[in-house]
Image (spheres, helix red, strand yellow):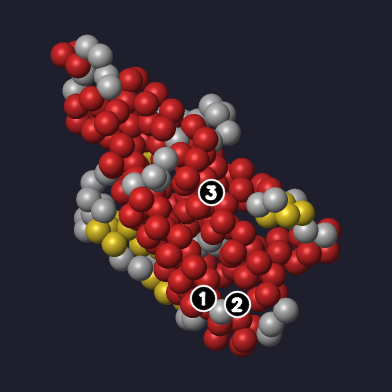
Amino acid sequence: MSSEAVIRKISALLARADQSQNDNEHEREIALRQANYLLAKHGLDLATLTKEQRDARQGPMFESDDVIGRAIWKAAIYSSIAKLHNCTCIRSPQNQSIHVLGRKAMVEVARSIAEWVIRSIEREMPIAWDAVEGKASINRRSFHTSFGNGASGAVSDTVDRILAERKKGRIGDEQLSRSQALVLSNQDKRALQESEDYLKKLYPHLRSGSGSYSGSDEGYAAGRTFGSSLSLNNQINRKAKVLEIR
């Protein structure tokens, strides 16, 4: 299957979910896993090609530039989804934008999924706020920020779980052979290293980004609950961070 066909399939999947308004935690996990399955299979196909053929299939190294505003939890979502697709991610605080770097085909897929997950979280925020009791003592803006941090943490956990399973050759409900798992793991390592080298070439001087503190316990808990089926429920830092351009 060509990279273009993979992108079309994933885009269609996300579009259907948006149209039906049924993008709950379980739906998002299914989407991420289906995307992972398609891309893992695509990675196995790529491993049989020469470097020139892989380059032609996935396109040139590419850097996207999307305005996301000041919400650091959104940058954290992009960073997690980029990692799932062997891409890297940096944030430009001055321009309030996020940059995903990697092979163009994978960057496009990562952007599509990240945008969809962010829309899902934003759509749930007012619903979660309406369900909170005793609002007089809670700042709505802080609640929303904390909700986003909690949800982005859950997405990060899900991505880590998917990647751990992929290293073992577990793709969705399918178990790859040991040799196939090794081929896929090596392909992932090469692709990620390529993206990281591209990042260093374009931005040799980076810094650790500032964090987004979760000031509302209620908001953070609601965000984690909303994304609970995407997480491993392990203890995580309550600050969302991503690399920034100096």
**Residue at the (55%, 29%) spot, across then down:** 233
Specify which label sits upstream in the sequence, 1 or 3: 1
Q: Is residue 233 visible?
A: yes
Q: Residue furthest right?
A: 178
What is the spatial separation of the Cα atoms under label 1 and label 2, in whole angstroms? 6 Å
Which residue matches tag 3? 30
As shown in the figure, which amino acid type bears the numbered disc 2? Met
Closer-to-camera residue (183/177): 177
Q: Is residue 134 above or below residue 189?
A: above
Q: Is residue 107 above or below residue 20?
A: below
In the rendered image, residue 16, in percent from the top left (x then y), is placed at: 40, 58
**Mark 1, secondary structure of its residue:** helix
Which residue matches tag 2? 1
**Residue 122 picture quarter:** top left
In the rendered image, residue 245, in percent from the top left (x then y), is placed at: 33, 57
Asked if the residue at tag 2 contacts the one at tag 3, i.e. Cβ–Cβ closer than 8 Å, the answer is no
Asked if the residue at tag 2 contacts the one at tag 1, i.e. Cβ–Cβ closer than 8 Å, the answer is yes
In the rendered image, residue 234, in percent from the top left (x then y), is placed at: 56, 29
Q: Label 1 neighbourhood size at 10 Å, few (<14), some (14-19), many (20+)?
A: few
Which residue matches tag 1? 5
As shown in the figure, which amino acid type bears the numbered disc 1? Ala
As shown in the figure, which amino acid type bears the numbered disc 3? Ile
In the rendered image, residue 53, in percent from the top left (x then y), is placed at: 62, 86
Asked if the residue at tag 3 contacts the one at tag 1, i.e. Cβ–Cβ closer than 8 Å, the answer is no
Side (left or right) of 101 relative to 166: left
What is the spatial separation of the Cα atoms under label 1 and label 3, in whole angstroms? 19 Å
Q: Is residue 129 above or below residue 165?
A: above
Q: Label 3 neighbourhood size at 10 Å, few (<14), some (14-19), many (20+)?
A: some
**Residue at the (61%, 81%) spot, across then down:** 54
